[in-house]
Image: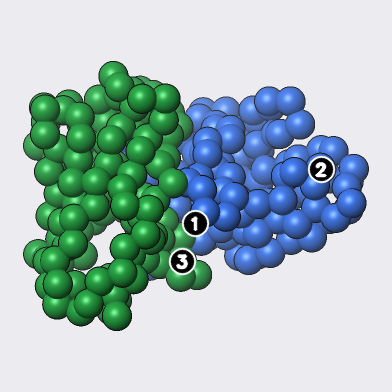
Chain colours: A blue, B green
Amino acid sequence: DQQVKQNSPSLSVQEGRISILNCDYTNSMFDYFLWYKKYPAEGPTFLISISSIKDKNEDGRFTVFLNKSAKHLSLHIVPSQPGDSAVYFCAARDGGGSEKLVFGKGTKLTVNP
Amino acid sequence: GAGVSQSPSNKVTEKGKDVELRCDPISGHTALYWYRQSLGQGLEFLIYFQGNSAPDKSGLPSDRFSAERTGGSVSTLTIQRTQQEDSAVYLCASSLGTGSYGYTFGSGTRLTVV
């Protein structure tokens, strides 16, 4: 039973436009959400996070939005750049005191020049 | 070191053999995690070490899997009697621990069981 779902396996956008990656979750106990970016043959790298008590966090071109009532979060990248092409994983932390994360299956983003 | 180091980067083994995967976390990071990514899947939690506390082994898929962390630093993940379904990329990550968000991952060990 997947607790973190990324329903779009892939997304393609034009350079300069906005990329929106979506993530849904089922466990209302999750207290922290993170996005990771992964290039081929490398480990995932931490990108941005948001606490469950907030609804928005922004870092440069990256903004994460959280809608707790809908159990939905999204990552916005604007403007998108070809170097953003990677697999993006959504992850959530169980609020029960453990630091382990539950990951989605990832969305492959392709930014076309 | 500057990052999380994993070895080997690739491992091909015959079904039924034992394998050991090594992880060197970032110096000073008290938390260490093992995940694996099978083809087309997300990252699956395996085990988590935090300081001197008992590890959280709740993600280990069977008793063929075990892990230890010596001296609060290097960790070894051991898979006994490997099966073809064990083929995956095994990722190690470390972090500063409780209250610190965002792991640093290594590049992983790609394990292929033939």
Amino acid type at image mark 1: Gly
Q: Earlier in the sequence, mark 2 or mark 1?
A: 2
- Residue A104 has which mark? 1
Helix, strand or loop at label 1? It is loop
Look at 67% across and 43% down and name the residue there: A75
Reading the image, the residue beneath label 3 is B41
Reading the image, the residue beneath label 2 is A80
Label 3 chain ID: B
Residue A101 in the figure: left or right of residue A6: left
Amino acid type at image mark 2: Ser
- Residue B64 has which mark? none
Amino acid type at image mark 3: Gln
Q: Considering the image in quadrants, where does the N terminus of chain A appear?
A: bottom left
Helix, strand or loop at label 3? It is loop
Question: In this orientation, does residue B43 appear?
Answer: yes
Residue B86 in the figure: left or right of residue B57: right
Label 2 chain ID: A
Q: Residues within 10 Å of mark 3 (few under 14, many from 20)?
A: few
Residue B104 in the figure: left or right of residue B82: right
Q: CA distance from mark 1 to mark 3?
A: 8 Å
